[in-house]
Amino acid sequence: MTASTPPDDRDTAGQEPAAQAGSAPSTPSAPDAEPAPAAARVPRRAIALAAGIAAVLLVAGIVPRLDARRAQAAQVSVQHELIVSTLTPTRAPATQELLLPGSVTPWADAAIYSRTSGYVQNWYVDIGAHVKSGQLLAQIDTPELDAQLQQAHADEATAQANYQFADSTAQRWQTMLQTQSVSQQDTNAKTSDAAAKLATLQAARANVARLSELVGYQKVSAPFDGVITVRNVQVGALVTAGGTPGLATLPGELFHIEQTDRLRVYADVPQDDASLVTPGTSVWLTTQQYPGRHFPATVARDSQAIDPVSRTLHVEVDVDNRDGALMPGAYAQVHFALATATPALELPVSTLLFRPNGVTVAVVDAQNKVQLREVTIGRDFGTYVEIATGLAATDRVINNPGDAIANGQTVKVAATAPAAGA
């Protein structure tokens, strides 16, 4: 029994070290348990930092959108009332210039033919020569015509002798009839024979006059003062009467003469302006050959009818050309100063709206509301037009209106100015 006591002591002693040895690892575990709260705080800071960054990014994305929405709302508020600029119509000019092409023609133009058949004996003028009325241009030799004239004179003499004899016989028979020496029938026969002889004499005289006239055409003369523009005649060339072809390769025209000291210019005026062209209308000509020079002219006459094909009025303008500056056949520009007694209002073309129902303008009333008015266009000045009807002088007309503008729409007038005018 005494022997068992030590082992118990050893066991006890052994357990104590074991207990101590077992308690040794528990002793350092106490310090490991205290860092646990610090490790938990590290993820919380990361989460807070991430949340802050997300909030900053969210604010950075939302604020510009809010600003854009506020700007858009302000812009929509501003555009709710359309801002327009208006013009007040002005009086159209009383005179408008109408420019038309013109054809310059001579005052008189004649082709000279031979009135008798024969050979050209001589010619005295050439192209470009200024001639006077009655001046000799050429001489034609007509031997056959001269022989015919001589024969006609002989026939006239025969007819004269026959008539004298028949007349004296008729007078004697009239005397004898008074004494009943001859019958009435024989006397009437003698009187009729004398009358027939008189008719034959008159025919012979007429033939002599005709041939004498043809002989006078041996001398070709100028019918009026002018310029020779064509000469188709040569010495010895055969010409025939009546203008029939007689020259080798020419249509029978000997000379062509034009009167150029005064010219006729023809222009076709459109139907819209035809009523404004009168004999008192101011008109002048311009040509490319003389830049800056105006040739005064006058409206002489017109056709008094509208051409149904071109819808124009044919007008003749006369111009003095004694200096010879203008040439017949040239192209000229005719300027008409068209005057109207009652000019209407005018507007720039930028104020016009072309709607299906016609030309329209947008007018702003006293309440700044739009009124669409149909107007009638009168004269056209290019960038400006005359408004014949549908507009008053006090109206405020919108300049450059949009196609979407509507009747009754409220607008804001930025400025009002008078139209500059054509």
Image (spheres, helix red, strand yellow):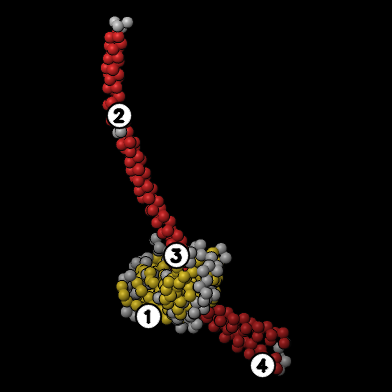
Q: The residue under label 2 is which amino acid type?
A: Ala
Callout 2: few (<14), some (14-19), or many (20+) C-alpha neighbours within 10 Å? few
Q: The residue under label 4 is which amino acid type?
A: Thr
Q: The residue under label 3 is which amino acid type?
A: Val
Q: Residue at x 32, y 5 (%)?
A: 1
- Please say if the residues under marks 4 and 3 sit with CB atoms less than 8 Å apart: no
Q: Which numbered disc, 3 or 2, marks the residue closer to the eye?
A: 2
Q: CA distance from mark 4 to mark 3?
A: 129 Å
Q: Which residue is mark 3?
A: 78
The secondary structure type at the circle numbered 3 is helix
The secondary structure type at the circle numbered 2 is helix
Sequence-first tag of 2 and 4: 2
Q: Residue at x 46, y 76 (%)?
A: 89
Sequence-first tag of 4 and 1: 4
Q: The residue under label 1 is which amino acid type?
A: Pro
Q: In the picture, residue 29 is in which quadrant?
A: top left
Q: Which numbered disc, 1 or 2, marks the residue closer to the eye?
A: 2
Q: CA distance from mark 3 to mark 2?
A: 75 Å
Callout 1: few (<14), some (14-19), or many (20+) C-alpha neighbours within 10 Å? some
Sequence-first tag of 1 and 2: 2
Q: CA distance from mark 2 to mark 4?
A: 200 Å
Q: Which residue is mark 1?
A: 296
- Please say if the residues under marks 3 and 2 sit with CB atoms less than 8 Å apart: no
Q: Which residue is mark 2?
A: 30
Sequence-first tag of 1 and 3: 3
- Please say if the residues under marks 2 and 4 sit with CB atoms less than 8 Å apart: no
Q: x, y percentage for residue 249?
A: 39, 60
Q: Which numbered disc, 4 or 3, marks the residue closer to the eye?
A: 3
Q: x, y percentage for residue 198?
A: 59, 83
